[in-house]
């Protein structure tokens, strides 16, 4: 257990990606614009993000995602539907509860469990390095996520920009025959690059949350 915790610490440090100047572009239309509106309230760049504020801001975005997921998963027919998720501060409360296993982000987990009952497969695409594959998969499954696929960065991926790496993984998921109905993340690098019908942006407070 001790070694796992140490590995996590290294991994999270490694994922402190410098949010490059990747701005939300025309490649990610959708709910992003409105969904981020509440995310930046009450914090400054140097301020520590307040846990209660963060939870409220996350819930506001997921409240917008829920009706979309409900509607989009109706009558899916033969379509293989997928949702792609970032992990840190999107699926798991990584920056707020430094524990292993880290707790799930409750409203995200709840919506994803619902999506899964509607036949949607969940794919997790993270900037965490591949040394963390097993503890990450264990963490996600222990807190209740049904994991159809987990993408971590292998050594060559570590030299690639995070946004390009994540976009390539979504393209890979599409090649398996999936339609990615939503991509949910908290950093701009999770969401740019297309390959998702809609993007939902959780708060990162200008890069304060990984
Ligand atoms: Mg994140």
Image (tube, helix red, strand yellow):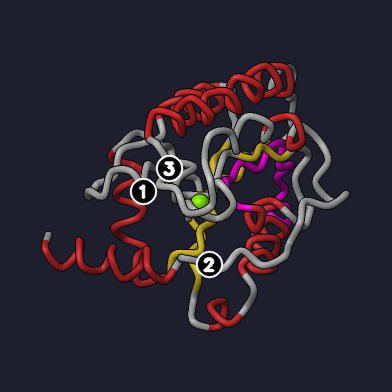
- Kindly identify which numbered label has been placed on residue 17: 2
Q: Earlier in the sequence, mark 2 or mark 3?
A: 2
Badge 2: few (under 14), some or many (20 or more) residues near its Cα, within 10 Å?
A: some
Q: Quadrant of residue 81?
A: top right
Q: Are marks 2 and 1 in contact (CB under 8 Å)?
A: no
How far apart, in angstroms, are the residues tagged by discs 2 and 3?
18 Å
Q: Position of residue 158 (x, y in %)?
A: 53, 78
Q: Could you say whether the residue bearing mark 3 is in a helix, strand or loop?
A: loop
Residue marked by disc 1 = 94
Tell which of 13 and 142 is nearer to you: 13
Q: Is residue 152 magenta?
A: no
Chain part drawn in magenta: 174-187
Q: Residue at x 52, y 30 (%)?
A: 58
Residue marked by disc 3 = 49
Q: Is the CB–ligand 1 distance for label 1 below 8 Å?
A: yes
How far apart, in angstroms, are the residues tagged by discs 3 and 1?
13 Å
Q: Residue at x 60, y 45 (%)?
A: 84
Badge 1: few (under 14), some or many (20 or more) residues near its Cα, within 10 Å?
A: many
Q: Earlier in the sequence, mark 2 or mark 1?
A: 2
The outermost residue toward the right is: 26
């Amino acid at each position: 257990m001790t070694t796992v915790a140490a590995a996590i610490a290294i991994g999270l440090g490694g994922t402190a990606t410098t949010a490059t100047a990747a701005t939300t572009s025309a490649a990610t239309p959708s709910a992003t614009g409105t969904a981020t509106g509440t995310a930046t309230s009450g914090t400054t760049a140097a301020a520590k993000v307040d846990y209660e504020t963060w939870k409220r801001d996350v819930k506001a975005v997921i409240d917008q995602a829920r009706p979309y997921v409900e509607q989009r998963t109706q009558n899916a027919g033969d379509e293989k539907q997928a949702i792609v998720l970032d992990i840190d501060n999107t699926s798991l409360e990584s920056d707020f509860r430094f524990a292993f296993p880290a707790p799930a982000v409750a409203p995200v987990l709840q919506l994803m469990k619902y999506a899964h009952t509607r036949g949607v497969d969940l794919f997790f695409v993270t900037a965490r390095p591949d040394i963390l594959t097993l503890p990450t998969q264990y963490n996600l499954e222990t807190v209740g996520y049904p994991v159809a696929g987990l993408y971590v960065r292998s050594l060559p991926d570590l030299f690639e920009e995070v946004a390009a790496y994540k976009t390539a993984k979504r393209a890979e998921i599409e090649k398996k025959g999936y339609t990615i109905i939503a991509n949910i993340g908290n950093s701009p690098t999770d969401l740019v690059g297309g390959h998702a019908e809609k993007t939902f942006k959780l708060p990162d407070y200008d890069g304060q949350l990984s």
